[in-house]
Image (tube, rainbow, N blue to C red):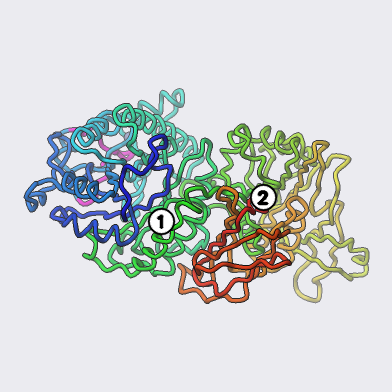
Amino acid sequence: MSTTLDETPSTAKWWTYPFAVFQTNLQEIDAGLDVEAALDAIQAHGANAWLLNTGGIISNFPTELPFQTRNPHLEERPSGDLVGDAVEAAHRRGVRVIARFDLSKVAAPIAAAHPEWCFRTHDGEPQVYNDLWSMCPSAGYYQERSFDIIDEVLDRYPIDGVFFNWFNFNIIDYSRKLYGVCHCAACVRRYRQWSHGESLPVDTRSAEIRTWSRFTAEVLADLNTRITAHIHARAEDVLVVLGKQAHMRYAESNKMFGRDLWPHRTGEDVSELRHHEPPVPALVNSVSFVDMPYRMAGEEPSHFAQYLIQGIARGGMPSTYIMGAPGRIPYPSLEAAGEITRFFRRHEDDVYGRLAPAARIALVKAPPAQLGSAASEEYHGTYSMLQRAQRPFDVIPLDQIAQLEAAGRLARFDLIVLPDVGALESQAAALDAYVRAGGNVLTTGASGFTEDGTAEMRTSPAHARVGDIRCGQDLWSTYATLAPQDRAASHHFDAPIVPVLGKLHDCAWADSTLRQGVMLPPAPFGPPEKAYGHLPSEEPAYGSLPDPGGGSVTVLPWTIGQSYREIETTPPQEMFLRIVDAAAPPRLRFDAPENVEAIVGTAGDDLIIHLVNLTGASRRGFRPPVAVTGLRVELPETTRDLRADALVAGVPLDAGVGGVLELGTLRDFEVLRIRGAASLA
Ligand SMILES: [Zn+2]
């Protein structure tokens, strides 16, 4: 808390050094906020940056712009200026201020004066929510007036950063009402020009929506780039949190009722954000309430803790987000959040300031197949199989592979897993280069095949897909097995028998393919009297092709992750791990229950292992975890000088001659720092 703004080295931007954010997402009635009391709470929490509502929907300072709305409650302040008071008080204490803008909506009089700025449905209706009119990013408010809005704040206040909320094309509103694609005049004109004459799609479930998504991504990217450049031309030390073009990438960790828990969501998001090129920091804004319609219902402390733990473990900056002035609404997770935030700050020099991801396995995440849909079952299944076996891995986005390869950032991985990601397009050549340089690739399902079935990677053992992709019920009663099944004709079978669900296709294999196991195509499964007759086909369970450069490609032409996810038995996981371990032999061995996640990184020469207790995972969220005892981490080698610490417990660990670290009790999480052992990751 004694930090001053001058301590950050002048050569590096302040946001490249660890910091922790506290967001007071204010209501207009909070304009009289006691800034000193708020800063007391922010600093006691461990945060050193304050994310504060500044402009856009409501201006918390006396704006002079005709298209902004001055908060009428500012009259409660002697100064009439909340932002001015906050920046002055925060800077006096060494706390940075990140100004929050929300350009997505304006008050009705502004919309009436500028109907051309407004969102329009395909039949011309505006999107109005609580008397606020939605603005369209294609039109003049975003495209031009946003610069004036930012300039007014930069002219008046020495803010440290800007953050833009909901900087997007609004297809739904807060009540989850679907409005669809904006058809304002600016969108109609821009889309026609961009698509060489096409009309905007109406149905958000149509195939054209993907084209529209690309259009919107380009509109936003262009605007983001211009806004960021504009801010930097004026103030180069102002952090901009805005889309993929800015200095920091942003993830929001939140709950949505009706959505089942994917227990790894925050860790996955941050890992994905950290594997963009060029690398920039990631901010994990963690929501203290259970969903937007229930902003006063506090999140479960164990659940909120997972946001922060998973976020910092993957190299994200922690941020705690509450509604209103601190203390106005009770949020039970703040105590746990403060403990983790302060832990992060205590270890910013020895761990988090230098933390780099160091897993040797990469799991590739494809963009969701449809607007707003979740990642594939295959992705989730492969994620779970790796996590539950404590095979540490990082998540990399499909569309970054070529850039990561070009930057030399794929070389760290022994294995890249592509879980039914579909066509690779421009990424295929980068994967070939990675394989020829000694890397290993595992594809499952339809990864690496074009629509017409041609294999995209030249290093692949499969030349092409043969026949159609079989899916759903056509696969019922299909199995894969690594045993020869020599006795199948007499109806005797040998383990393993792996059920196949999801998708399957045949392949035309290269002659030198190493064919592993066989497939057992369907036989009758009912009634029981008739449920027999499986015979091995000519197709292997998977095929591998070693590359002369030392790498390999393994093609598993079915969805082993989905098979695991649907059934959750061990045989699919064992088959999967057999391939994984051959390509990336585990160096660290964890003697731990399945619901402990191990995340590896390095900080300088030190190996950093985050162990996350996921035992509290339940249907919709995390309940309090069960304390785990008897955890052991076996290191591949040891030296006399090897020193390790359990940083959460605050105790040194002795690896002994056998190189085994024995932990005490694992509660929410533990962080192991093993001195000089970075090469063991
Ligand atoms: Zn529009």
In reply to whether residue 115 is colored magenta, the answer given is yes
Asked whether 208 or 64 is in front, the reply is 64
Q: Which residues are magenta?
A: 114-130
Q: Residue at x 35, y 57 (%)?
A: 320
Would residue 266 be visible to someone looking at this image?
A: no
402 versus 441 height, above or below:
above
> Which quarter is ligand 1 in?
top left
Q: Residue 594: which quarter of the image?
A: bottom right
Element under disc 2:
helix
In reply to whether residue 54 is colored magenta, the answer given is no
Residue linked to disc 1: 345
Q: Is residue 24 left or right of residue 205?
A: left
Asked whether 50 or 6 is in front, the reply is 6
Asked whether 407 or 11 is in front, the reply is 11
* Quadrant placement of the N terminus: bottom left
Please tell me how many numbered marks the rendered image carries. 2
